[in-house]
């Protein structure tokens, strides 16, 4: 992945993310997106201490998620995020959840973030220093092109047999993330507001 505006995290779906239907619970995607956004910010030099110094923080105004395909325990997923642009006080952030074994998009989403002053609790101007720290990616096509051109070692997955339980566990070869990134502990995450989302898959 050569585009510096695209932040990516490669991981394996844990058992704890699976719901009663045998696939990843839809609300897990929200948690993953919040975590990868914070990890991206941290990687670009804007960690919790930097926000405290700037007396600002980001909160979520809205989420839009399209759930396209389910994910299952043990699958290798690539979570990608990028900043789509900046307005005076807001910024859209985009996400893709990409499955490695069949190179399919499982979900895509957009979050509208609002920059707040921690002194007044009201929206304020996005600092110029923050804007200059991120490379804007205005079009998802750039991300898909980068994904499809990436040279990821192919993983041999066992074939699903008809009627097999969807909660089966795959035996994966070790995966190396494109970035050595770990999500910050919850105590160090930025304060964000997450609205209630009704889980659903598109038919």
Image (spheres, grey):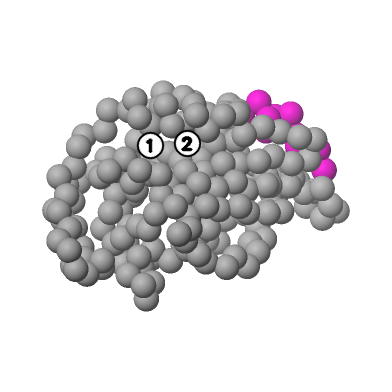
Labels in figure, total: 2
Q: Residue at x 48, y 58 (%)?
A: 202
Horizontal side of 189 relative to 161 (left or right) equals right
Marking on residue 7: 2
Instruction: List x then y, in percent, for residue 93.
Output: 60, 41
Span colored in magenta = 124-133
**What's the distance in space between the residues labelled 2 and 1, CA to CA?**
8 Å
Residue 41: which quarter of the image?
top right
Q: Residue at x 80, y 35 (%)?
A: 88
Q: Main secondary structure of the magenta part?
A: helix
**Cβ atoms under marks 2 and 1 closer than 8 Å:** yes
Instruction: List x then y, in percent, for residue 173.
Output: 16, 47
Q: Residue at x 52, y 33 (%)?
A: 140
Can residue 47 be seen at all in this image of the molecule? no
Nearest to the observer: residue 203 or residue 130:
203
Can residue 129 be seen at all in this image of the molecule? yes
Reply above or below: 155 against 119.
Answer: above
Q: Which residue has dot 1 on it? A: 179
Horizontal side of 154 relative to 96 (left or right) equals left
Membership of 196 in magenta stretch? no
Residue 2: which quarter of the image?
top left
């Amino acid at each position: 992945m050569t585009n510096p505006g695209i932040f990516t995290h490669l991981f394996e779906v844990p058992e704890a993310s699976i719901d009663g239907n045998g696939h990843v619970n839809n609300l897990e995607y929200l948690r993953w997106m919040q975590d990868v956004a914070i990890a991206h910010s941290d990687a670009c030099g804007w960690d919790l201490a930097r926000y405290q110094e700037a007396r600002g923080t980001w909160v979520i105004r809205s989420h839009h998620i399209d759930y396209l395909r389910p994910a299952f325990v043990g699958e290798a997923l690539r979570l990608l995020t990028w900043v789509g642009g900046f307005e005076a006080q807001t910024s859209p952030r985009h996400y893709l959840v990409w499955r490695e074994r069949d190179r399919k998009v499982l979900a895509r989403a957009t979050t509208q973030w609002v920059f707040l002053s921690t002194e007044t609790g009201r929206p304020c101007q996005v600092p110029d220093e923050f804007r200059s720290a991120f490379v804007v990616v205005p079009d998802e096509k750039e991300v898909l092109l980068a994904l499809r051109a990436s040279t990821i070692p192919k993983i041999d997955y066992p074939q699903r047999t008809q009627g097999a339980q969807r909660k089966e566990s795959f035996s994966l070869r070790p995966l190396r993330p494109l970035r050595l990134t770990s999500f910050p502990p919850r105590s160090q995450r930025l304060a964000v507001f997450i609205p209630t989302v009704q889980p659903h898959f598109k038919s």
